[in-house]
Image: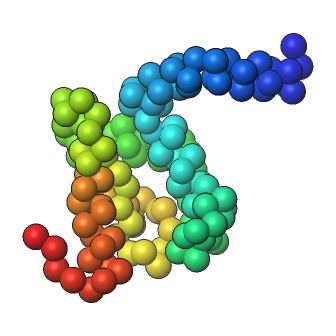
Amino acid sequence: MNKEERLLYQQRNRKENNNAYTKKYEKTVNGYLMRMYRNMKSRITGVNKKKAHLYVGKELLLKEEFYEWAKCSPMFMVLWDKYVSSGYEQKQAPTVDRKNSDVGYRLDNMEWVSHSVNSKRGAQSRHGIQLQ
């Protein structure tokens, strides 16, 4: 099976099983980090057009560096455990927050927070308000 045939086969299988295997994989540390890095890369490369002005052209650390940083981070593991214990509630999901939004994804500019905290910070930044 060549690369193109393999891709079509995978697409057909995902459609038939409603992405069950992908969804299951993304509930593992490796799968979650893979999706997170892919999303970060999409922002930086402009695939996500709606917010391209916030990300395009900024730095993005190498995938291997990101995985190592994440897996060696005690905070990631604390947040991951809370996320799993909550039954994968989105607000508990670990996310990367850029300390300075003018800078890209660099080790010295990233920290782990919950999705809820990251959303509140974003709203505060956009609207200049203090959230409880």
| 90 up-or-down from 59: above or below | above
Q: Residue sitting at 47 percent across and 62 percent down?
A: 106
Q: Is residue 25 visible?
A: no
In this rendering, would 62 be left or right of 28? right
Between residues 111 and 41, which one lies in front from this camera angle?
41
Q: Residue sitting at 35 percent across and 61 percent down?
A: 97
Q: Residue sitting at 33 percent across and 71 percent down?
A: 122
In this rendering, would 132 be left or right of 120? left
Q: Is residue 85 visible?
A: yes
**x, y percent for residue 34:** 51, 38
| Quadrant of the image occupied by residue 43 | bottom right
| 54 up-or-down from 87: above or below | below
Between residues 27 and 77, which one lies in front from this camera angle?
27
In this rendering, would 78 be left or right of 59? left
Between residues 62 and 116, which one lies in front from this camera angle?
116
* Image quadrant where one finds the C terminus: bottom left
* Image quadrant where one finds the N terminus: top right
Q: Residue sitting at 47 percent across and 79 percent down?
A: 102
**x, y percent for residue 14:** 63, 23
| Farthest residue, direction bottom | 128
**x, y percent for residue 21:** 52, 19
| Farthest residue, direction left | 132
